[in-house]
Amino acid sequence: MSQRNERSAQPELDGVNHWLIHHAACRAPESLSSRLEEEWLADLESRSSALSKLSFAVGCCWAAMVIVNDFPRSRVPAVSSAVAASSAATANSAAAASSVATARGLIVLADRNFGYFSLRPGTLFLIVGIHAALFCGVITTPLARARMATPTKAQNQVLSALPLEIEITDFLPGK
Amino acid sequence: MGKKETTVRISLQTLRVLEAFLENPTQKLAGAEVHQRCGIASGTLYPILLRLESAGWFVSQWESADPSSLGRPRRRLYRLTSTGLRRASEVFASFNRGVLA
């Protein structure tokens, strides 16, 4: 019975998995998008159970977010195709592959240096800022209350200019 | 001389991925095969593969078989470069020294 339900839900789950992977690949950098979609769809087929496929597809969504953070303007596929072409032409030229790989590394390094305010320092800055605001709030609120409780200089001033002796009869009616 | 290599953040998962490739450094592995060997979830695995590829430790290429004959999309196969092999060996050597010291 449960197997029959699982089989009937299989095409729908496959559709969900494909949609999730397509959505994740669209979120990835444009140069990597088609490559990642094809790669993930191929690897999805290697999973056997429906739950495993679903967890794989959800994981791809997470992977896309991480890749966006790591490779904001990636040039990996262009260089990878160059590497693939060079490796097809000269299969045993490891030195050439390493030199191309070094060039690719420099490109990515330049990309990373360009975006100097990435997600991680931003998150750290936000957390520190929230803590600082809370700390200031905790410190200043009791001080403000204490200041309000004590009378100010104007409130407890002695009014020495008033006449000390006042004739009450001056205020009586009929005077 | 004059060569610059990007630094790769070495996490435990990265070590497990490298370990899967170091079992046979010449073989090409797809992401699904790396997952079967390491058990790392896809959300962690593919960023690591891309990171190592961009750092020059891996190269990747599509499998040569025809997708229509396979009945599925092509797999992307990853392989260690000579640089990656050297750097991975250094990482594991330093890791072992750190553990044993």
Image: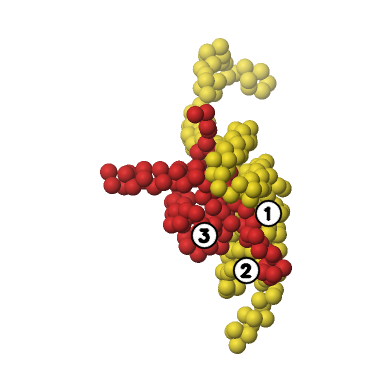
Q: Which chain is red?
A: B
Residues at circles 3 and 1 in contact by the CB criterion of under 8 Å? no
Shade of chain A as shown in the rendered figure: yellow
Q: Are marks 1 and 2 on the same chain?
A: yes
Tell me how far mark 1 sits from mark 2, CA to CA.
Answer: 16 Å
Q: From the image, tell me which residue sits under label 1.
A: A35
Q: From the image, tell me which residue sits under label 3.
A: B34
Instruction: Tell me if residue A9 can be seen.
Output: yes
SS for dot 3: helix
| Residue B23 image position (x, y, % from top left) | 43, 57
Look at the picture and state if B35 lies above or below B69.
Answer: above
Q: In this view, does A61 lie to the left or right of A26?
A: left
Q: How crowded is mark 3: few (under 14 residues within 10 Å), some or many (20 or more)?
A: many
Most distant residue in the left direction: B101
Tell me how far mark 2 sits from mark 3, CA to CA.
Answer: 15 Å
Look at the picture and state if A71 lies above or below A27.
Answer: above
Residue at the spot 52% in from the left edge and 24% down from the top edge: A152
- Chain ID of residue with mark 3: B
Look at the picture and state if A170 lies above or below B66.
Answer: above
Give the camera-side residue of B29 and B44. Answer: B29
| Residue B100 image position (x, y, % from top left) | 28, 47
Residue at the spot 51% in from the left edge and 17% down from the top edge: A158
Q: What residue type is labelled 3?
A: Val
Q: From the image, tell me which residue sits under label 2.
A: A45
Q: Is residue B90 left or right of residue A27?
A: left
